[in-house]
């Protein structure tokens, strides 16, 4: 029952994902959450670090699609510097937004990695779609009010899963 919460990978940060590492694991496209994955939830715009990371991936022929549950206004302002697809109001873990993202990349599901910081939205959504998922630690400890309950529930589930699955550990790369 709790397997729907189990990520494929657990990483300290999305920024540890590098093109060579992704390609070695067979990943050819990235779907990434925005808030607390690429930038702090209260940052107005993508940071230089986020822009460089996305550019590095795309320069290596790994398309990146930002897929967020946040509003269109918030997501489009934050990502206006990007020259790549963005999906707002994705309603993860439901399939609606994820299906939109899959239609934007010409890559089989087995070669796509979703990156996100929440189990209830990102991990469940990816698992429901049959996509590998990298759970990353949130960039900042503070959260929007509507995320705090999810974080509490997720902490209990993650602690349980990590006790039952000793191989589940936070790492710096997909090699560990």
Image (tube, rainbow, N blue to C red):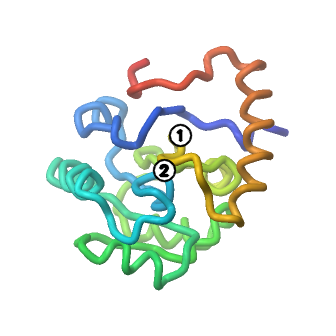
Farthest-out residue, left: 59
Tag 1: Cα neighbours inside 10 Å, few (<14), some, or many (≥20)? some
Farthest-out residue, front: 142
Quadrant containing the N terminus is top right
Instruction: Please say if the residues under marks 1 and 2 sit with CB atoms less than 8 Å apart.
Output: no
Q: Position of residue 74 (x, y in %)?
A: 47, 78
Nearest to N terminus: mark 1 or mark 2: 2
Q: Position of residue 16 (x, y in %)?
A: 34, 35
Is residue 119 shown above or below 45?
above
Is residue 101 shown above or below 128?
below
Q: How many marks?
A: 2
Which residue was labeled with disc 1?
137
Q: Quadrant of residue 77?
A: bottom left
**Relative side of 60 to 37, left or right:** left
Residue plotted at (34% across, 69% down): 45
**Relative side of 48 to 100, left or right:** left
Residue plotted at (61% across, 16% down): 167
The numbered disc on residue 66 is none
Dot 2: what SS? strand
Q: Position of residue 141 (x, y in %)?
A: 57, 46
Is residue 139 shown above or below 10?
below
Q: Position of residue 3 (x, y in %)?
A: 75, 37
Residue sitting nearer the eye, 95 or 17: 17
Q: Quadrant of residue 89?
A: bottom right
Dot 1: what SS? loop
Residue sitting nearer the eye, 46 or 132: 46
Which residue was labeled with disc 2?
114
Q: Quadrant of residue 64?
A: bottom left
Farthest-out residue, right: 1
Farthest-out residue, top: 166
Residue plotted at (36% across, 31% down): 25
Q: CA distance from mark 1 to mark 2?
A: 14 Å
């Amino acid at each position: 029952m709790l397997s729907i919460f189990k990520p494929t990978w657990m990483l300290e940060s999305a920024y540890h994902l590098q093109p060579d590492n992704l390609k070695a694991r067979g990943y050819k496209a990235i779907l990434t959450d925005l808030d607390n994955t690429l930038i702090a939830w209260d940052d107005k715009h993508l940071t230089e670090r986020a822009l460089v990371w996305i550019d590095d991936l795309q320069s290596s022929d790994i398309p990146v699609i930002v897929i967020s549950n946040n509003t269109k206004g918030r997501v489009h302002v934050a990502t206006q510097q990007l020259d790549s697809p963005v999906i707002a109001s994705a309603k993860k873990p439901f399939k609606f937004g994820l299906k939109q993202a899959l239609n934007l990349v010409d890559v089989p599901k087995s070669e796509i990695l979703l990156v996100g910081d929440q189990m209830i939205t990102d991990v469940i959504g990816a698992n429901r779609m049959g996509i590998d998922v990298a759970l990353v630690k949130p960039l900042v400890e503070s959260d929007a009010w509507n995320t705090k309950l999810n974080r509490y529930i997720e902490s209990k589930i993650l602690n349980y899963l990590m006790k039952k699955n000793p191989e589940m550990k936070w790492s710096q790369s997909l090699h560990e």
